[in-house]
Amino acid sequence: MALDRWIALVFVALCCVYGYAAFFTMDHLLPAILQRNPIWPSTFPKILSVLGVIVGLVVLFSPKAKTDAAEASVAADAIDHRRLGEYNLGQALVLLGLMVAYALALRPVGFLGSTVLFLALGGFILGERKIQILIPVAAVAAGSIWYLVQEVLGIFLRPWPAFLI
Amino acid sequence: MLEGLLLGLAAAVTPFNLVMVVLGCVIGTVIGMLPGLGPMSIIAIMIPVAIGLGDPTAALILLSGVYYGAIFGGSTSSILLNAPGVAGTVATSFDGYPMAQKGQAGKALTIAAIASFAGGTIGAILLMIFAPALSSVALLFHSAEYFALMVVGLSAIAAFAGTGQVAKALMMTILGLIMGTVGEGALSNMPRFTFGLMELQSGFSFITLAMAMFALPEALFLVLNPARGAQSGSGAAIKDLRITKDEARKIAPVIGRQSLQGFFIGVLPGAGATIASFLGYAVERNIAKGEEQAEFGKGSIKGLAAPESANNAACTGSFVPLLTLGIPGSGTTAILLGALIALNVTPGPRLMTDEPDVFWAVIISMYIGNLVLLILNLPLIPYIAKLLTIPRAYLIPFILFFTLMGSYIGQNNATELLILVGFGVVATILRFADYPLAPLLIGFILGTMMEDNFARAMQLYRGFGFILERPMTLALLILAAALVFVPAYRARRARLRQAGVADGD
């Protein structure tokens, strides 16, 4: 089964869960006075879940459209999941991990430290080995962005690790 | 209208706002030129900055400057590198890149800039004429019509998604609507679908979603496939920016036609700069005769002027539904709508009466933005183009970092970043499977408004009666159904004919 059909299947399942929540778990929480309203908080979700299941099934079962040869050649530059093995999947996954690590470190380590580390490590993962350039670039960028956000835009960003401030 | 123009002039031509226009255009051009960052990602990244300004006029001016700049920057990389940074400028590379190969890069850039300028300016004039008229009609609409209009908008976006894509686009729209119901509904302030999580109480943040849908997948694609947007070395020096009088005479009618056509395509929901530019190119190629037609694809100046004026006019056109109805027709205007709502401005027919300064200032800033692009960016292009030589190892971490910052600054909440990464992965998988993501975001943004209007109509008419009692609502809903079913029916017919089942035409 092609990837888009798997996604449609997941979507139908999602709509079923969503619809179950809308049809069976929400209405009894509603105060009696609101039940006299013609519209309940669950009305719109109910409609959406039904529509979602229908459209999802259409995508799931509609026959595959034939792709033209011309279209395929135009799409040579386009990304294709069947060639995933040829891509730098490892790099992408490590970078995603780095982003999660950054999100978790932002508060405890502070903006400046975590950003310098993020930018430098990101460059390192992508193959840059000149650390003597990488770290200064990252430090200058982190410093100037912090200054812009904090001083010009007036949005507080904790610059140093939590235990210092 | 004159009064409005003066009001707009007064609001837009302050030193601060002028700086914003220039800044927006330059930032847009610089980032739009980089491979893999389209106008949607750039605007999404700029939103926290714009919201930080606090003034809706300045914010909108900045963002529309960024939008124009991004489209212009995209054409620059299309011409110089054959690597369009933006889908709307793919058609530009058909003739722009051959011109650059022939050593006419400077001329190509000038034509692109003039065509963009003309397209944008004509678009702004048309916007000025049509928006007030449409607004006064829209003031007659009730919540029932608004609901129906949003249904039409969402179906049109799905319908224009291309053959075989309609159902997928609809699926994404519904997913967006479903995601829009997470959090406290406006109806009863009862938390819905939050799974008891505090973080979801106020729903998903639209900036996070916009980043996750557009900026993050593009950045990941750049990592995955280094060939994507690879620099094919534009060694050609950019010189001789002048064009001759004869050439100007040749492209003038093309620019005129395509600005008009592009604008009206841009007004339609779902059809944006991309469709306008491809259609403009195709139309001009068909109109051109003999020798000129053979030139297309080999460096025809007409073939360059057509998509350039069409895509800029379409960008302006896409502001019409946003400013008059409050319904975004494209992913980019959806992001702008989100930014406006965050700034406590609700676009719609009342915008012109309630906050005329915002409305007119935007229109004036479009003129100024186009002028800035022409007189400031064109001479700077050879220098800005040097940016294209930044190595990936530096570029990509920065793109990822700006994506993260964009959603962090608005919320100051690290959980938001985890949601961003999660959705980003989901969006990348969806992109792999050819699901369009703009409908999702538009659905998400319109979802709340749609439910509000639906609820109001239901309450006024005590049930679904409003569909039958208001003829306009019914007509709009029928139109929406037709928009979805006609392409589906035609695709089915085409498929059957291919299989040799259907006969007749």
Image (spheres, rainbow, N blue to C red):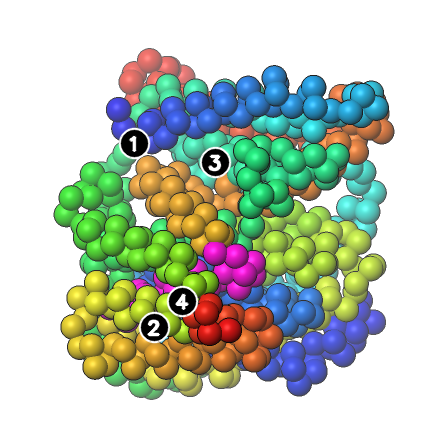
Q: Secondary structure at mark 3?
A: helix
Residue at 56% over, 50% down: B205
Q: CA distance from mark 2 to mark 4?
A: 11 Å
Residues packed near mark 3 inside 10 Å, few (<14), some (14 to 19) or many (20 plus): many
Closer to the observer: label 3 or label 4? 4
Closer to the observer: label 4 or label 1? 4
Left or right side of A153 for B244: left
Q: Amino acid at mark 3?
A: Met
Q: CA distance from mark 4 to mark 1?
A: 40 Å
Residues packed near mark 2 inside 10 Å, few (<14), some (14 to 19) or many (20 plus): many
Q: Amino acid at mark 2?
A: Val
Circle 1 sits on which residue? Answer: A3
Q: Which chain is disc 3 placed on?
A: B
Counting residues from the start of the chain, the first of labels 4 and 1 encountered is 1
Residue nearer the viewer, B147 or B370: B147
Quadrant location of the N terminus of chain B in the rendered image: bottom right
Q: CA distance from mark 1 to mark 3?
A: 15 Å
Closer to the observer: label 1 or label 2? 2
Magenta portion: prevailing SS class: helix
Q: Amino acid at mark 1?
A: Leu
Q: CA distance from mark 3 to mark 2?
A: 37 Å
Q: CA distance from mark 1 to mark 2?
A: 38 Å
Indicate which disc residue A116 carries: 2
Residues packed near mark 1 inside 10 Å, few (<14), some (14 to 19) or many (20 plus): some
Estimate the x, y position of residue B216 in percent, counting from the top left: 38, 54
Estimate the x, y position of residue B432 in percent, counting from the top left: 31, 41
Left or right side of B322 for B292: left
Check chain identity for marks 3 and 2: say if they share one: no
Whether residue A90 is situated above or below residue B451 in the rendered picture: below
